[in-house]
Image (cartoon, rainbow, N blue to C red):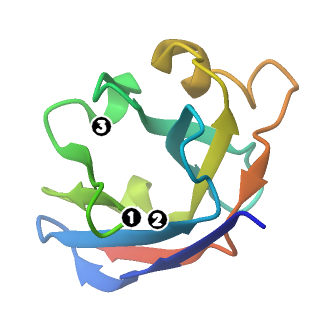
Amino acid sequence: QVQLVESGGGSVQAGESLRLSCAVSGFADSKYSLGWFRQAPGKEREGVAAIDSDGNTAYTDSVKGRFAISQDNAKNTLYLQLNSLKPEDTAMYYCAAVRGEIPVRIVLQITAAGLTMDYWGQGTQVTVSS
């Protein structure tokens, strides 16, 4: 049973930082790609950052240079470091996983293409005030 459990969201001022964590379990030795997605009220869910089993990463343009995705395989944990936060980053952030060797740039576009990841966490709220 694959499980993804996020933590680390909160309310901050513009310019501040947060680190989101996602505890990942159930994949054993399978190949998979992980991603962080976000959804603001009234907007579509969008891919923010993705990473694959080889450590390749990809980011949506609006967060490049500010956010960093990483994973600690020993702890089975995925992270998203959010720096220089802006009010437009306010959203529910979701950790998600897809089985197989999916290129990370494709993972980012999965929801925009009308598709979905195989597994989703419950989400963690990030609120940035100006």
Which mark identifies residue 76?
Answer: 1
Q: Which residue corresponds to the image point at 71% horizontal and 25% vertical from the top-left?
A: 110
Separation (CA) of disc 2 from disc 1: 26 Å
Name the mark nearer the viewer: 2 or 3: 3
Q: Is residue 118 visible?
A: yes
Circles 1 and 3 in contact, beta carbons < 8 Å: no
Question: In the rendered image, which quarter is residue 81 located in?
Answer: bottom left
**62 or 47, nearer to the observer:** 47
Which of disc 1 and disc 2 is earlier in sequence?
A: 1
> Left or right: 86 with respect to 105?
left
> Does the rendering let one see residue 130?
no
Residue located 28% across and 29% down the image: 55
122 with respect to 88 (left or right):
right
- Is residue 109 rendered to the left or right of residue 67? right
Kindly indicate whether the residue at mark 1 contacts the one at mark 2 (C-beta within 8 angstroms).
no
* Amino acid type of the residue that numbered disc 2 sits on in the rendered structure: Thr
Please identify the quadrant where the C terminus is shown: bottom left
Q: Quadrant of the N terminus?
A: bottom right
State the separation of the CA atoms marked 1 and 3. 24 Å
- Residue under the point 62% across and 51% down: 96
**Position in image of residue 15 (x %, y %):** 11, 64
User: Which of the pair 94/17 is nearer the observer?
Assistant: 94
Label 1 secondary element? loop
**1 or 3: mark nearer the eye:** 1
Q: Residue furthest right?
A: 114
| Residue at image point 30% right, 22% down | 56
**Residue where numbered disc 2 is placed:** 90
Which residue in the protein does label 3 denote?
63
